[in-house]
Image (cartoon, coloured by chain):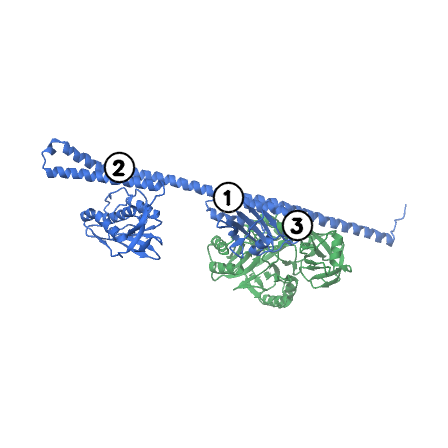
Amino acid sequence: MNAPITPSFEQLQRELDFYRREYDEMGARLVRLQEEQSRAAREARRSKIVARLVRDAYQIVHQDIFASKIGGLILAMVADTALCDKAAFLKRDPMNPENFLVEHALGGMSADALNMPAPPAFLFTASGKPPEPAASPLIGLIGVPFILWAYDEESGRGVLLGKKFEGNIHRPFEARDNEIVEVVLAVYIDLLLRKGAEAAMRQARQAAEEASNTRARFLANLSHELRSPLNTIIGFSGLLLEGRARTAPPAHRDEFARQIQAAGRSLLALANDILDFSSLGHARLQLRRDWVPVAPLLHAVARALAQDIAARGVWVDVLPLQPELQASIDYDRFRQILTNLLGNAVKFTPPGGRVEIGACLVGHGGVRFSVRDNGIGMRPEDLDRALEPFVQLKSESNEHPRGAGLGLPIAKQLVEAHDGELKLSSVYGQGTEVIILLPEGSARLA
Amino acid sequence: MNGTIRTVFAQDQDAAAAVRAAQAALSGEPADLIIAFVGGKHGPEAVHAALRAAFPGVTLTGGAAAGVISSHGFGYGGFEIGLIAFHGPDVTPAMVATHDLLAGEFAAGENLGRSVHDRTADGQAVFLLFDSVASVAPLRLHPASQIMAGFQSGLGARELHVVGGGLLTDINLSGGWLLDGADVCKHAAAALIFPPGIAAETVIFHGCRPASSFLEITKIDGAEVLELNGEPALTVVERMLGLTLGTTSGQQLSLVATLGQKQGDPFAPFDENAYVNRLILQANPERGSLTLFEPDFEAGARVQIMSRDNILMLESVTRGVADLRRLMGSKTTLLGLYIDCAGRASVMSGAETEEAELVVDSLAPEFPFMGFYSGVEIAPFAGGTSRPLDWTGVLTVLQTAS
């Protein structure tokens, strides 16, 4: 039996040193492996961030939001990845191609715009990398030293991400981070295009629906507006053709003829209105502007409607106005506008009521026309509808008003063709006022 | 027990909108006290104004958080808001605060400890929050070890269950602030004292493993370790790890290794609970030194370089949650509170799994749960008094005492 070997102190010391060295070496390897694993995980994080951004951003496609909100939502998603402290989308200024406007920002920017004559497609800053001159204005804008930038020349849009520190949490920005900013920018531009296309489609659908509604209203109104005068024409012409009418007194026959003529004029006016409205809706009206004295125009309009005014039993006043006042307008078209407005006012003002028509110089060479009545007025909810074509508002008495419902819409379009604005205000039961404002340079005193 | 505790999470770039969303989720009885954890991209004044408007008359505390962890949501992007709302005197903590950390962390902690001593009996649970960042440039933290040394001194013989954390605006240590019930404060600490009817159980999750033999600190100045085994500390660590550290910002060191001091028998088998780890705040190549998060290591102390171990970190969570379940027994749990080192977030650790989400998934939705990413964690350590810890997750449950 061998006696146990007792190692010497030197042997034990060597053994201890051996284990210590190995332990330290293993420990160092552990640290390096851990670091490599962490680095790999952080690299993988870039792909995860990209995937998450794409996934989250495309959720927006299904949301009912305006295109103008998309940038803010995407920046919030970017921030949620803890990738940066600040971020912004920039857009080339259409008025000055060297200028870039901040479209959306997360965190404060030092300005709303940035001058950048030659924006690079991509750049980043890091402490271990020589600075690029193009980075300076971007750093100045975002206010933090470490940035990522991507720019798309075709759309004129860029994205800028920035962080205050580069060391502790995130690895420094590097060239491969172009994946992140380029994806952010591409997704943003793509979503803007999609939302733009969606909006255009929605607008087209709305226009089609509106046209369909208009057509339906048109047909409904037209049948009424055609039937009444046609019945008049058929009825009275029938009477004239019958044997009894030949023996009737001449005054009766004249009356029959007048009724037939009035019905015919009514049909002609309706046809004119429809043609007018149709042509206004399809092409920009060519106006023949001239300096027109306003006072004679207003009096002429009032005179033209004298018969209706008398028949209705209302008072029409042309308000005192400056005799030198002239407006740069198409005489025939503006007369049509005022005739429509005054005709409406007369139509919706009960006997004994009062209608005023006037005009005055406003601001620096603008002009304001007004037609005001103390008639039946309109309910607030009817104000917008009154400007829609083929809409006829019913009065309290439920009386079906005459006309195709085109007077105000035509007037509005003609005013807009004059670069003016038509405003409607009304108090139900108290009256209505229509104001036309023509811009500066439309009036003078001559 | 009639009182209730509720938690809510909201996230929005607009602080007021985030608070409104949180308010909507908390609709019902007005709270007596709210602890708010606020992501660092929100301005403190704006958040405070929004909270004040949404919860008039409610005592507001809490402060900046490098991220929020809850069963309703999770994130560290900077726009998170997590609220814990306490309803009823039997669950609502009383608050005492100090604003004197800048003048001296020990003295401020001691005053706070005395105030807590005067308002407590043995066994009560206390939640301690403090502003972690004393100065951004140059970077200096309010050392939790000094605050806690003072706090324990102020407590005297009082035995309390103290947990807590340092408040940070973000993981980059770029700021911190605290709500003291009335205002947004810097350099302040608050102690929330839970009523005697509430008991706390706490487990600590780790995630570091020794990667070197023992090294003796031969020269140290506060938190700056100048020499290990008689050589410049940075040289020793770089040589041992075979890595060149501190070449850029120096802060990268905290991504790589920590220094750990083993408590008890140094040659006992590895037990993660036996280690107090200190993160490395920065390296100074000129001085060859390493600055730690805390100045509580002394010359002569034997430390080891510790490697983060992401797998160990996740295993530690699984083990810790199982331990906590055993400790919880059948008592009613009112709140789960998680104070998680910001460095454990996967954005920093590189872990494939978010450790905090693992914690939430392990417990939710059994009881209201709220956590935040902190600069330092405070918890009862090794059966003794509470002390500050780095690179840990501190999970506490508040339960009915009986």
Drawing shade for chain A: blue
Q: Where does label 1 land, which residue?
A: A191
Q: CA distance from mark 2 to mark 3?
A: 82 Å
Task: Name the subunit of mark 3.
Answer: B
Q: How would you rate the neighbour count of disc 3 (Cα within 10 Å): few for under 14, some for 14-19, many for 20 or more?
A: many
Which of the 4 quarters of the picture holds residue B153? Answer: bottom right
Marker disc for residue B185 = none
**Residue B352 in view in this figure:** no
Residue placed most toward the observer, A234 or A412:
A412
Marker disc for residue B313 = 3
A241 with respect to A295 (left or right): left
Q: Is residue B176 above or below residue B312?
A: below
Q: Is residue B111 above or below residue A243?
A: below
Q: Indicate the amino acid at tag 1.
A: Leu
Drawing shade for chain B: green
Q: Regarding mark 2 in the picture, which secondary structure is present there? A: helix
Q: Is residue A256 above or below residue B119?
A: above
Q: How would you rate the neighbour count of disc 2 (Cα within 10 Å): few for under 14, some for 14-19, many for 20 or more?
A: few
